[in-house]
Image (cartoon, grey):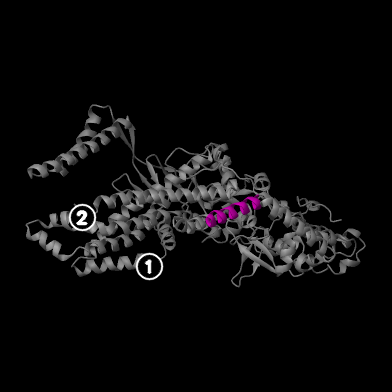
Amino acid sequence: MFKLVKRLTSFVAMFAVLFTFTTETMAAKKSKTLKNTQKKGFVRCGVSQGLPGFSNADAAGNWTGVDVDVCRAVAAAVLGDSSKVKFTPLSAKERFTALTSNEIDILSRNTTWTLSRDADIGLTFVGVNFYDGQGFMVRKNSGISSVNDFKAGVSACTNLGTTTELNMRDFFNSKGIKYEPVTFEKADEVVAAYDAGRCDTYTTDKSGLAAQRIKLSNPDDHMVLPETISKEPLGPVVRQGDSVWEDIVRWSLNTMIEAEEYGVTSANADMMKTSDNPAVKRLVGAEGELGAALGLDNEWSLRIIKQVGNYGESYKRNIADTGILPDRGPNELWTKGGILYVPPAR
Amino acid sequence: MNFKKILPQLLTLVVVILVFGFFSYNAQVNMENRGITFGYGFLTQESSFDVQFSLIEYDGSHSYFRAYLVGLLNTILVSVIGIIFATIIGVVVGIARLSSNYLIERTAAIYVEFFRNIPLLLQIFFWYFAALRALPLPEKAEPMFGVFFLTIKGFFIPAFIWNNLDIFIYSVIAAIIAIFFVRAYAKKKQENQGTQTPVLLISIGLLIILPLLSFLLGGVDASIEIPVIEQLSKTSFTYKGGLKLPPELISLALALSLYTATFIAECVRAGVQGVSKGQKEAAASIGLTPNQVLKLVVMPQALRIIIPPTTNQYLNLTKNSSLAAAIAYPDLVLVFAGTALMQTGRAIEIVSITMLTYLTLSITISIFMNWYNKKIAIKEK
């Protein structure tokens, strides 16, 4: 019965494909997500429930942050307008289900790239937009200056359903310390509980610690320990099975990073069209046919740079100037001693 | 004739099966398209996350199934505590609402109206964060009776260290069985000879003497371990030894029982008011004492009215305990449908197990309460 239905549907679909072949490019044809996005007129983007620097909404409901900028870049590339994004705030627990069940099309929510997430649950990580690592925050007057000062019985507050929970166990186990994990669903409750003294330490990604510290009643009474206990490459995620959409998101991010590498900014992007460097010309769409390969026009990357800016601008605007992490650390270009290195757009 | 009767039901069944089939087929296709595999094999894998509070021995080297048990037991624990306290508070407040003392009656009424009209989640947050703000840090806690310490990091109480605990438990079970026999004997004696036996006194005696014998003859031995303060760093302290009840458990149990008690109080009030005045007057007129009137005439009739709606409240409390995730109490939802779901990504499997578990819990409570309801129902002769 089902086979018959399937055969019939594929037959009809084949005709439909042949019929509409001339009106749409191959890539757009192949990508259901791209087609739906163009039809809806906005990019559906899953973000955090409020992490300053990464994805945070102000009182007027305007989202800002480096994670937000990835979605804005995709909107600029696909729809021509970086403001055409619908943001859905998600808890750590909800995020993957929201993506796999088609509620959102991009998950850009400080999410760690791991093997099991990439391979096992229907997700694809497209790249890394922030290299992070897990750290610990403690009260300054506690006299703890290193993770080696923790003693058995220490209670640690953190978010539920994160890699943090697993790293924390690995770390304390390796030190042979018995600890008490106190896990909350929302970051705000973690901060409140730590602030009240329920926990001796608050552990999460270091960027998160730096951002959440601002929310404490006396931020200056707290400090982040120097050690980093894990690798946390954070990046945008898409559903498995739509390789065109995957490529669009990946290259939107790569464009921002490569633009910084070649010194193309939102201010000078238009002028760069007449650059002597062919790589720069390709980047702003003045040479080559790179857009067509993604099912987009040739100005897609130019719009990203003009409307959102390059990675450095985004970092400066969201993370450095807000005082969260003024030092770029590993998130500096490979040419300047960092590890940001993206494949060439050509 | 028969066929006509069956046809609508048959059609309904077919529709139900088709709807279920449609959804499960869709789910299957969607999961296949996204490369998601389905299976319960993950339950035996190492969970690799820890839980702050557990009734059974557990750490990350145990399986996801054991993590499930940890969550389930914690859910049952907070539900049982909640049900016990909600019942006690509910009965007291319900009776207080019938008091002829204006102050008591009003206080009870205000309590009921206040607590049942504020969303439970807010109350849970209130008790948790209010408790966190109001409780002292471990080093500043004033000991209660020298051995109890109520602090922001939890309620530290002395623990018993047992030798031959099993023999002690057997002696308690033996005492309970003996009490049943005594009660049956007393009932028979009253029916046959009309004389009363002091059942309560004998029961208490049995409950004390048998366990005591286990200490004297059975080699049972218990010592008490008192929590001792321990320094973790310059400014942070905790207690070592003894038993620790996390503040999450205390505030959740408190919020659940205070909230549910208001509804039980109303059930109790309705039940007692539902017994007609004539019954009490008739009972008094044949010479029963006020206590006997309450115990033999009013309560048995009131209970018939009280039990069914109270069953609902018990079910509600158990289901409401799933709000625990908001304040870090490691219940079934937080441990299994939260962390385990996140770490494995097996949403359909885990949510289905969790739903089935709550269903089973609710049905169990319901069956027990229905049995009790039947037991106290009027037996027509």
Where disc 2 sits, the SS reads: helix
- Specify few, some or many for label 2: CA neighbours under 10 Å numbering under 14, 14-19, or 20 or more: some
Return the chain for callout 1: B
User: Real-space Cα distance between discs 2 and 1?
Assistant: 30 Å
- Please tell me whether residue A30 is drawn above or below residue B245 in the rendered image: below
- Residue B50, placed above or below residue B263: above
Q: Position of residue B145 (x, y in %)?
A: 28, 46
What residue span does the magenta drawing correspond to? B14-31
Q: Residues within 10 Å of mark 1 (few under 14, many from 20)?
A: few
- What residue appears at the point 52 percent right and 37 percent down from the top-left corner? B62
Q: Depth-wise, is mark 2 or mark 1 nearer the camera?
A: 2
Q: Any magenta on residue B30? A: yes
Res. B371 in view? yes
Q: Circle 2 is placed at which residue position?
A: B300
Q: Main secondary structure of the magenta part?
A: helix
Check disc 1 and report the residue beneath it: B117
Please state the horizontal and vertical placement of residue B294, each as a whole percent of the image.
16, 57
